[in-house]
Image: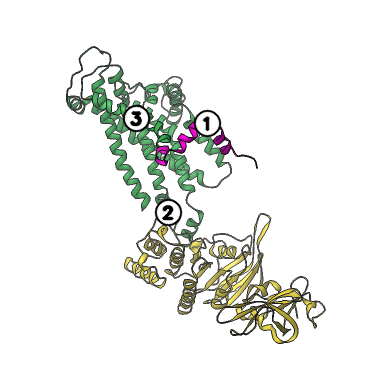
């Protein structure tokens, strides 16, 4: 395993700048999650590190070695593609064994069989080993695709939304499984997702990408509690952070245009009046949809709240985030 | 609201006809639709086939309509299968089939592989390569007789230029050792583009992401070619072989134009042989049996082949 360093990596496609001076370090044994919506450049970062695409400017190092001009094979990376990219004419077993059959590795057949079976059991696809790759459901294909990366022992695992097409239960299982594998083997992961739960639960560090610019890097907690911008603040947290005009409440700094309120930054029972428009009971928590001076606010309250639609709740911001006109954080 | 065409059609239908059609069951309507096709098929495919089978057991000659038709049992068949001349023409056909298929597959696949690499102007190249296929076989055959001319032929000149041989020292069409190859060359020139197009369709059906996955899995270009490209194009290749094989089994026009079956009967492939028996020697019963034998051969080979093709596709 090895660390990955991106140094001011830039990539343009025609007039579009996909990556703009992205510098990022994935420490050895780290689990870095890139977070951002579609088109933010997450996949492009993975392609840069894998060697499937080359940067226009900037350098990439894996394990201290400059790999910018090397092929994917020379970089020794394992990648899980969002669209699975299984070998359709091969069985699941042959798909999983494919990377091990590389002449570079010279893995003995018994060893290949053992590893394939082990990975298949981890990913709960052992009963499908002799199926053709195309005769699987989307979730099974995705697991084979993950398995094809896990059978190897690469310098770094690159994963492009590997859990996106799985059902909720399997996604939760595999999230824990991947994290366990990473913790057990000390593997280095660079992981792309737009799912904030994956980011929060798996990442040692999160990088927030916005249109090719890495706007913030830090632990999930740091980004959640100390976002640098409106954009970074809206990536994490469920329900999403409430963004309102700053002058709605008293006490905003002069430069502030927007006030950001996560549920825990809204003290209930004090301050000004708002009207409950909807009560969503999710079991472990209850969400309150409020109308505050014709602005919608979503917050969380205790599960067994007696509140109902039309009730009045008093709310007061508590240590809120303020953002200026450009969206940057105002201290 | 304006009326759609269907409504107008319904209104224009005479009352009596409309009532009649309305009374028909779905099944009856279906028969009305497929009926004409079935009748046509029976008349121009099935009936002649059965009639030919019947004729193949007789001594019927179409140029002697007044003679009594005698049932001769399987005599025609035994005569054909023991006739060395026919076996020679079968051999000529097999030789021709094997080499045209081999060359067309190898060259066609190679061309497709080259064209499939993304480079400027590959569409133009595709068009240029495909041109021979667009020509009529009779025209192609005619032109190549000129190209093969020992004195003025471009082909002989080119060979002479490349090997230093005297261009007029050999004749592709008249030399016993070269005549079979003259047909193979022309057929390959003409039909390789067809194989290329099919291979190109196969190559284009492989998504880039599979090669990217293979690259990350550290497969060398050589291994990618043999473990991804070839197996994934194989069903397409086999289809090309099927089409070209059936076509070339009944090859006629090119050969007639180029060598006319000669020198001697060296390049007399079965289709020409059959035509001579049927329409020059007028041995109708005999040639019917011959046609049935050829039909069973092609059909049998194709059936075995299609089974193999399906197995490859299901793999």
Left or right? Give the position of B43 relative to A305.
left
Give the distance between the C-alpha atoms of the residues marked 3 and 2, in whole angstroms. Answer: 45 Å
- Residue at figure coordinates x 40%, y 70% from the top left: A124
The residue labelled by disc 2 is B228
Percent coordinates x, y for residue A122 in the rendering: 40, 73
Give the distance between the C-alpha atoms of the residues marked 1 and 3, in whole angstroms. Answer: 33 Å
Left or right? Give the position of A250 relative to B42.
right
Residue nearest the observer in this picture, A9 or A126: A126
Q: Which chain is yellow?
A: A
The residue labelled by disc 1 is B14
Quadrant in the picture for residue B38: top left
Percent coordinates x, y for residue B83 in the rendering: 20, 25
The secondary structure making up most of the magenta span is: helix
The numbered mark, 3 or 2, whose residue comes first in the sequence reads: 3
Q: Is residue B269 visible?
A: no
Q: Which quadrant, please, contains the N terminus of chain B?
A: top right
């Amino acid at each position: 395993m090895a660390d990955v360093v991106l140094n001011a990596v830039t990539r343009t496609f025609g007039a579009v700048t996909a990556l703009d001076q992205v510098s990022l370090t994935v420490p050895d044994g780290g689990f870095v999650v890139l977070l951002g919506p579609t088109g933010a450049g997450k996949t492009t970062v993975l392609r840069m590190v894998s060697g499937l695409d080359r940067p226009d400017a900037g350098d990439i190092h894996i394990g201290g070695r400059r790999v910018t001009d090397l092929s994917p094979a020379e970089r020794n990376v394992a990648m899980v593609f969002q669209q699975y990219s299984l070998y359709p004419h091969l069985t699941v077993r042959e798909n999983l064994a494919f990377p091990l059959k590389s002449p570079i590795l010279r893995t003995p057949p018994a060893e290949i069989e053992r590893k394939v079976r082990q990975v298949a059991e981890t990913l709960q696809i052992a009963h499908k080993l002799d199926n053709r790759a195309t005769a699987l459901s989307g979730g099974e294909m995705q697991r084979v695709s993950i398995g094809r990366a896990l059978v190897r022992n690469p310098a770094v695992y690159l994963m492009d939304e590997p859990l996106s097409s799985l059902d909720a239960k399997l996604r939760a299982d595999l999230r824990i499984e991947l994290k366990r594998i990473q913790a057990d083997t000390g593997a280095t992961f660079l992981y792309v997702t737009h799912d904030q739960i994956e980011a929060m639960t798996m990442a040692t560090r999160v990088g927030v990408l916005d249109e090719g610019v890495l706007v913030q890097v830090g632990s999930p907690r740091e980004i959640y509690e100390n976002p640098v911008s409106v954009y970074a603040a809206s990536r994490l947290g469920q329900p999403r952070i409430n963004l309102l005009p700053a002058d709605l409440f008293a006490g905003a700094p002069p430069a502030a245009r927007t006030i950001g309120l996560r549920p825990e930054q809204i003290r209930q029972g004090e301050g000004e009046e708002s009207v409950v428009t909807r009560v969503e009971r999710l079991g472990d928590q209850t969400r309150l949809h409020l109308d505050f001076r014709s602005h919608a606010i979503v917050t969380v309250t205790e599960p067994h709240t007696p509140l109902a639609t039309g009730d009045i709740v008093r709310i007061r911001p508590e240590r809120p985030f303020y953002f200026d006109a450009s969206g940057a954080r105002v201290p | 609201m304006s009326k759609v065409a269907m409504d107008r059609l319904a209104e224009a239908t005479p009352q009596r006809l409309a009532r009649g059609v309305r009374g028909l069951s779905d099944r009856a309507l279906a028969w009305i639709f497929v009926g004409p096709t079935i009748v046509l098929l029976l008349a121009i495919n099935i009936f002649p086939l059965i009639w030919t089978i019947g004729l193949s057991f007789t001594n019927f000659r179409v140029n002697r309509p007044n003679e009594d038709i005698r049932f001769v049992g399987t005599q025609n068949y035994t005569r054909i299968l023991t006739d060395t001349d026919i076996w020679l023409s079968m051999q000529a056909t097999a030789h021709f089939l094997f080499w045209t298929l081999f060359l067309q597959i190898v060259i066609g696949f190679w061309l497709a592989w080259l064209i499939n690499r993304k480079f400027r102007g590959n569409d133009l190249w595709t068009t240029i390569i495909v041109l021979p296929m667009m020509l009529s076989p009779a025209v192609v055959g005619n032109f190549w007789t000129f190209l093969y001319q020992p004195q003025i032929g471009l082909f002989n000149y080119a060979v002479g230029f490349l090997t230093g041989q005297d261009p007029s020292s050999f004749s592709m069409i008249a030399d016993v050792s070269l005549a079979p190859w003259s047909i193979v060359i022309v057929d390959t020139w003409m039909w390789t583009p067809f194989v290329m197009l099919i291979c190109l369709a196969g190559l284009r059906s492989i998504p880039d992401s599979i090669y990217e996955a293979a690259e990350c899995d550290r497969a060398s270009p050589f291994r990618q070619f043999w473990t991804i490209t070839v197996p994934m194009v194989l069903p397409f290749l086999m289809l090309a072989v099927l089409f070209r094989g059936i076509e070339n089994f009944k090859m006629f026009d090119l050969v007639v134009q180029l060598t006319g079956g000669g020198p001697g009967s060296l390049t007399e492939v079965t289709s020409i042989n059959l035509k001579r028996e049927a329409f020059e020697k007028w041995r109708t019963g005999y040639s019917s049996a011959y046609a049935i034998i050829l039909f069973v051969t092609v059909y049998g080979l194709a059936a075995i082949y299609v089974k193999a093709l399906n197995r490859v596709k299901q793999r």
